[in-house]
């Protein structure tokens, strides 16, 4: 079964609540706020640590950051 995920930008709590209500009856849809934090990465860069940990993360979806900034949410499917 294909699963649908909505990641909602942290500053869009009303949108997250709305989507959660809209898809409450759908078993294959999950809605959640973006839990990622850029703080750790920025702190590491400030200390001269330039190791890119995200490059090996297979879960990373490159379009998520762009959609979160432009739309306030990102949606993707996983089969």
Image: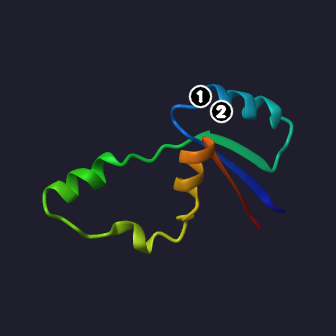
Which residue shows up at 53% across the image and 46% down it? 69
Give residue 7's position: percent from left, percent from top.
Answer: 62, 46
SS class of the residue under badge 2? helix
- Residue 67: give its label: none
**Total numbered labels placed on residues in the image:** 2
Classify 50 as above or below 8: below
The N terminus sits in image quarter = bottom right
Q: Nearer the viewer, residue 40 or 25?
A: 40
Q: Is residue 66 left or right of residue 50?
A: right
Which residue shows up at 41% across the image and 73% down it? 55
- Residue 13: give its label: 1
Classify 3 as above or below 12: below
The local crowd at label 2, few if under 14, some if 14 to 19, many if 20 or more residues have their Cα within 10 Å, is: many
Give residue 28's position: percent from left, percent from top.
Answer: 81, 50
The local crowd at label 1, few if under 14, some if 14 to 19, many if 20 or more residues have their Cα within 10 Å, is: some
| View extreme (front): residue | 70
Give the residue pinned by disc 2.
Answer: 16
Q: Quadrant of residue 17?
A: top right
How are the colours assigned in the image?
A: rainbow
| View extreme (left): residue | 47
SS class of the residue under badge 1? helix
Give residue 10's position: percent from left, percent from top.
Answer: 51, 35
Q: Is residue 44 left or right of residue 16?
A: left
Marks 2,1: beta carbons within 8 A: yes
Which residue shows up at 22% across the image and 68% down it? 50
Q: Nearer the viewer, residue 43 or 3?
A: 43
Which residue shows up at 58% across the image and 31% down it? 12
Q: CA distance from mark 2 to mark 1?
A: 5 Å
Give residue 49's position: percent from left, percent from top.
Answer: 18, 65
Q: Quadrant of residue 79?
A: bottom right
């Amino acid at each position: 079964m294909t699963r649908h995920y909505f990641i909602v930008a942290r500053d869009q709590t009303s949108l997250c609540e709305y989507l959660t209500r809209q898809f409450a009856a759908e078993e294959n849809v999950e809605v959640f706020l973006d839990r990622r934090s850029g703080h750790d990465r920025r702190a590491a860069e400030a200390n001269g640590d330039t190791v890119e940990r995200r490059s090996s993360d297979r879960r990373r979806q490159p379009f998520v950051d762009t959609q979160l900034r432009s739309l306030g949410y990102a949606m993707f499917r996983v089969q």
